[in-house]
Image (spheres, rainbow, N blue to C red):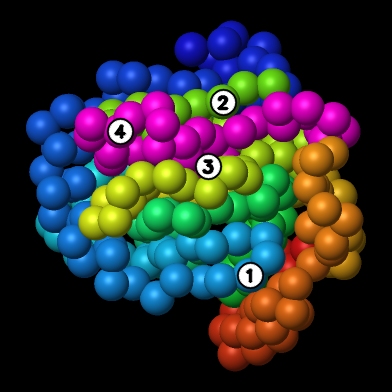
Amino acid sequence: NRERFAAASPWPHVVLDDLFDPALIAAAEQEELEPSLHLEVDHSYRKIKAESPQPSGPTATKLLESIGSADFVTFLEELTGISGLTPDPTHYWAGLHVNPPGAFQAIHRDFRVHPITGLFHRVNILIYLNSNWKSEYGGELELWKPDKSACERQVAPVAGKSVIFDAGPEAIHGIPEPIRCPTGKARLSLAAIYYTVDPPPNDRKESRLFRPKRPQDPWYMGFGTFGDGVNLVRRTIERRSAGKGHSGTSG
């Protein structure tokens, strides 16, 4: 799959259907669905979403542990061509992602640097847990061209499907249309992020004020939120509290 990953459009990624045992995926969904509906939901004009760095049940926890193993990291390095990948066992901004009815996330670039370790964000994996997910529920992950002119690929969040992608500045993605699943159900995914000490070749800092948006989105969707400012202050405090003894760079 390495050639598929490198040649994928609109930016390097691969979608795999058979990476994990279907029985584990089904067990993880069964264990996580009910508790996930009680998580605090973050509301803003750019997203409605809930998440937890630690799943509730043993199966999802086991899956996250497995994709943090040395063997899996080696697989990712061979797949992506990025050497020196480091997993994050704390699952900062990762872990279990939950999109209940009405939830969405505007197209966006992911954060550039881990706020505590200072390591550079390089690779994402998303693992979907949604059995019997109907097309009318929506929830497709949209992969957008770097110039934000059009969505080039949609990935349905069906159980067992995994998406691995280079999280560089070109990787604009999101779930911009509200989820239409019924009450008592949610779009569930497990997420893990991998880092490197050195920045990617195309590294660049992005504006904290201006945000990606679709051509059809209202003008205000192109600006950051008050929560962005709160998160910036929080990340600064966390990084300073962690001290200067970590092995990464501050970027």
- Residue 133: quadrant of the picture: top left
Residue that badge 2 annotates: 154
Question: Mark 1 or mark 4: which comes first in sequence?
Answer: 1
Instruction: Estimate the x, y position of residue 66 in percent, counting from the top left.
Output: 26, 43
Magenta region, residue range: 122-151
In this view, the mark in front (2 or 4): 4
Camera-side residue of 138 and 200: 138
On the question of residue 75 being in view, the answer is: no
Kindly identify the amino acid type of the residue bearing the numbered disc 3: Asn
In this view, the mark in front (4 or 3): 4
Question: Mark 2 or mark 4: which comes first in sequence?
Answer: 4
On the question of residue 185 being in view, the answer is: yes
In this view, the mark in front (1 or 3): 1
Kindly identify the amino acid type of the residue bearing the numbered disc 1: Ser
User: The residue tagged with tag 1: helix, strand or loop?
Assistant: loop
Instruction: Estimate the x, y position of residue 216 in percent, counting from the top left.
Output: 80, 40
Mark 2 surroundings within 10 Å by alpha-carbon count, few (fewer than 14), some (14 through 19), many (20 or more): some
> Pointers 2 and 4 in contact (CB under 8 A)?
no
Marks 1/4: CA distance? 26 Å
Question: Any mark on residue 44, and which?
Answer: 1
Seen in the picture, residue 175 relative to 219 is either above or below; the reply is: above
- Residue 203: quadrant of the picture: top right
Marks 4/3: CA distance? 23 Å
Kindly identify the amino acid type of the residue bearing the numbered disc 4: Trp
Marks 2/1: CA distance? 23 Å
Quarter of the picture holding the C terminus? bottom right
Residue depicted at 30% across the width and 24% down the height? 19
Residue depicted at 88% across the width and 56% down the height? 219
Residue that badge 4 annotates: 133
> Pointers 1 and 4 in contact (CB under 8 A)?
no
Marks 1/3: CA distance? 23 Å
